[in-house]
């Protein structure tokens, strides 16, 4: 099933229902890419999309979705850099963008995600140094299967990173 077709058919009715009631979107196994129109769902608190089939695409424009406390875009064929704006979402508790092709370094702005409980950046193409604040955060962080250039491996092992 094509995700963009779902959002185009009855899009505004769908948005009104989601804004008024559920505030959660969960989808799995559809064809992508994630349509940019999803970014208008500013009141959404939980967005979970996984296992999209189809072509590679850049990270969807979600900068207006500042109410999200859970963002899961696992195995969605995403490429390019992690967006800086996620670091301004102070209420974000779960970030899972594992099993994509995201590249570049972890933005410094992510230090601002002070309430984060779970951060999964597993199996991407991320590079650079692992920020010290991630090593301090400790548990429920998975950075494995990336291309980081340096980190104190002793810290990674003792803190379950």
Image (cartoon, helix red, strand yellow):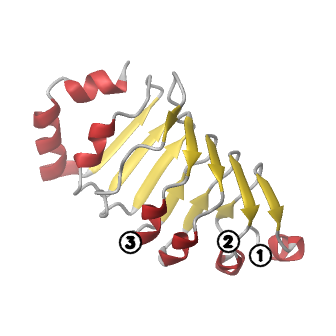
Q: Which residue is drawn at 77% across and 75% down?
A: 159
Residue 88 vs 2, above or below: the answer is below
Residue 91: give its label. 3
- Disc 3/disc 2 C-alpha distance (Å): 18 Å
Q: Between disc 1 and disc 2, whose residue precedes?
A: 2
Q: Nearer the viewer, mark 3 or mark 1?
A: 3
Residue 30: x %, y % from top left: 43, 25
Is 114 on the left or on the right of 67, as rendered? Answer: right
Q: Between disc 3 and disc 1, whose residue precedes?
A: 3
Residue 66: x %, y % from top left: 31, 63
Q: How many marks?
A: 3
Residue 159: give its label. 1
The secondary structure type at the circle numbered 3 is loop
Question: Quadrant of residue 9 in the image?
Answer: top left
Q: Mark 2 points at which residue?
A: 139
Residues under numbered marks 1 and 2 in contact, where contact means CB atoms less than 8 Å apart: yes
Q: Which residue lies furthest to the right in this view?
A: 154
- Disc 1/disc 2 C-alpha distance (Å): 6 Å
Q: Nearer the viewer, mark 3 or mark 2?
A: 3
The secondary structure type at the circle numbered 1 is loop
Is 42 on the left or on the right of 123, as rendered? Answer: left
Residue 133: x %, y % from top left: 65, 79
The secondary structure type at the circle numbered 2 is loop
Q: Between disc 3 and disc 2, whose residue precedes?
A: 3
Residue 158 vs 4, above or below: the answer is below
């Amino acid at each position: 099933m094509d995700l963009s077709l779902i959002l185009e058919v009855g899009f505004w009715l769908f948005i009104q229902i989601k804004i008024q009631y559920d505030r959660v979107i969960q989808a799995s196994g559809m064809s992508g890419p994630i349509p940019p129109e999803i970014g208008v769902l500013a009141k959404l608190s939980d967005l979970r999309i996984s296992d999209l089939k189809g072509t590679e695409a850049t990270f969807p424009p979600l900068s207006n979705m500042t109410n999200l406390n859970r963002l899961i875009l696992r195995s969605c064929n995403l490429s390019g850099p992690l967006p800086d704006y996620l670091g301004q979402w102070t209420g974000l508790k779960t970030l899972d963008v594992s099993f994509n092709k995201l590249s570049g370094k972890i933005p410094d702005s992510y230090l601002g995600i002070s309430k984060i409980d779970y951060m999964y950046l597993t199996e991407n193409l991320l590079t650079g140094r692992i920020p010290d604040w991630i090593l301090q955060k400790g548990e429920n962080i998975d950075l494995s299967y990336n291309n980081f250039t340096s980190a104190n491996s002793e810290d990674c092992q003792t803190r379950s990173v």
